[in-house]
Amino acid sequence: MKPAEVYILNKPEPFKSILMHLQAVIEHTLPTADLKFKWKLPCYYIGKRPICYINQSKDYVDVGFWHSAYISKKFDQYLVSEKRKIVKSLRYKTLDGVNDSVLIDILNEVYEHKHKSFWK
């Protein structure tokens, strides 16, 4: 088993279910994405380019995007930056709170710009 998968399976509920759901959505949306374990976090890469990471922290799960500068403004209401200069994330406290269509749309936008610099 990959270290990233061990990370997910070792999390307590409800975070494990949220992480497993996010993993399924990401892998279905971006089938060429490779799950790696970087910076002690599950990270998805396409080739050598990072696409996103998933992380359980405190009382929520984050899906972080390095290419956030290229995400449409219409998703600003869903994204959290918390004093981060590059990364923005979707944040979930419950499995029911995951909006698959927003996640899929953002993943597709990030994928389109994967070859660009994180800075716009």
Image (cartoon, rainbow, N blue to C red):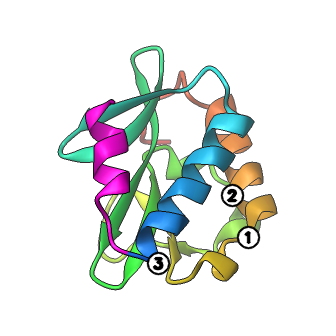
Q: Nearer the viewer, residue 38 or 2?
A: 2
Residue on which disc 2 sits: 103
Disc 2, disc 3: CB below 8 Å? no
Q: Nearer the viewer, residue 16 or 113?
A: 16
Left or right of residue 22, residue 65 in this image: left
C-beta proximity under 8 Å, tags 2 and 1: yes
- In whole angstroms, how far apart are the C-alphas of marks 3 and 1? 16 Å
Q: Residue at x 18, y 43 (%)?
A: 39
Q: Which kind of residue does numbered mark 1 sit on?
A: Asn
Total label count?
Answer: 3
Q: Which of marks 2 and 3 is nearer the N terminus?
A: 3
Identity of the residue drawn at 66% across and 72% down:
98
Look at the picture and state if 15 lies above or below 27.
Answer: below
Per the image, label 1 sits on a secondary structure element best described as loop
What residue does disc 3 label?
14
Picture quadrant of residue 107: top right
Q: What stretch is highlighted in magenta?
A: 1-12
**Residue pointed to by mark 1:** 99
